[in-house]
Image (cartoon, grey):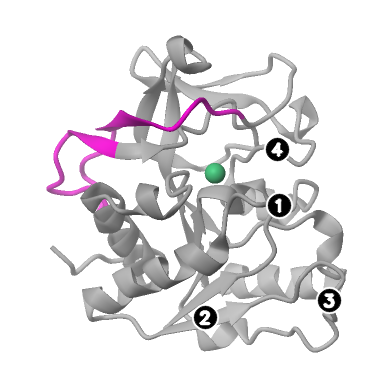
Amino acid sequence: KVMLLDGEQGGPYHAWQETTPYLKKMLDQAGIFDVQVVTAPPAGGDFSAFKPKWQDYQVVVANYDVPDERWSDELKVSFEKYMREGGGLVSVHAADNAFPKWKAYNQMIVIGGWRGRDEASGPLWYYKDGKLVSDNTPGKAGSHGARQAFRIVNRVTTHPITTGLPAEWMHVPDELYATLRGPGEHMTVLATAFSAESNRGTGRDEPILMVLGFGNGRIFHTTLGHDIAALNCVGFITTYQRGVEWAATGRVTQK
Ligand code: ZN
């Protein structure tokens, strides 16, 4: 049982009204998910009746980006409790922009960008010489160049989400998120992509797919999926379908 959570995002980009039907269809086509779309109230809307029944779902897929103040402490605590007790979260693309000051959420998404994040949010995380490193250089968090196709490199090929996939694959034109910051604790980076300086990048291998735990909960974080064109990639679809199942159950039964 999957809650696909969408609603408010930052601007004219990240049109969740367009991407949510695609994200739902990919799960429907896998044939093992029961997906309900839950749309949060807009900015300025009435949140008094917005009390999602997290516990009715094995996983929450977040296609959702909002500032910290949009959710009450009570709502935040209800989600933390759900996750600690064994819930699942899948963070898609700009969901890692949301809630820059909510400590537990940032422990869940583990790295994020924009909405004022900087060195106070945690170090930069990237791959260097085949290893994940953190970097305390100060600065803003979150950047990307123009949307171009780029190569994804699977760094861990024994995880259920990446088992049997090509070691490297080309992703369709998308934003390659870079300079993400966060606690970084306990995460396993499954895949990276090289952020080319020729496209306003860092010259580093940036984390693209991540997994981690939070209490008894499981999180899959993909930075891919800016728009419909970026979702239209067999590599995205495969890792997303697998990631949702893994976050829900801890296993992957799909081929
Ligand atoms: Zn984007």
Observer able to see residue 216? no
Looking at the image, residue 67 sits to the left or right of residue 241; the answer is right
Mark 4 sits on what residue? 114
CB of residue at label 4: within 8 Å of ligand 1? no
Q: Compute the Cα span from label 4 to label 1.
A: 10 Å
Helix, strand or loop at label 1? It is loop
Mark 1 sits on what residue? 10
Helix, strand or loop at label 4? It is loop
Q: Compute the Cα span from label 2 to label 3.
A: 18 Å
Mark 2 sits on what residue? 37
Q: Is residue 232 above or below residue 210?
A: below
* Magenta residue span: 143-171
Marks 4 and 1: CB-CB under 8 Å?
Answer: yes
Q: Nearer the viewer, residue 162 or 175?
A: 175
Query: Picture quarter containing residue 132?
Result: top left
Q: Compute the Cα span from label 1 to label 3.
A: 15 Å
Earlier residue among tags 4 and 3: 3
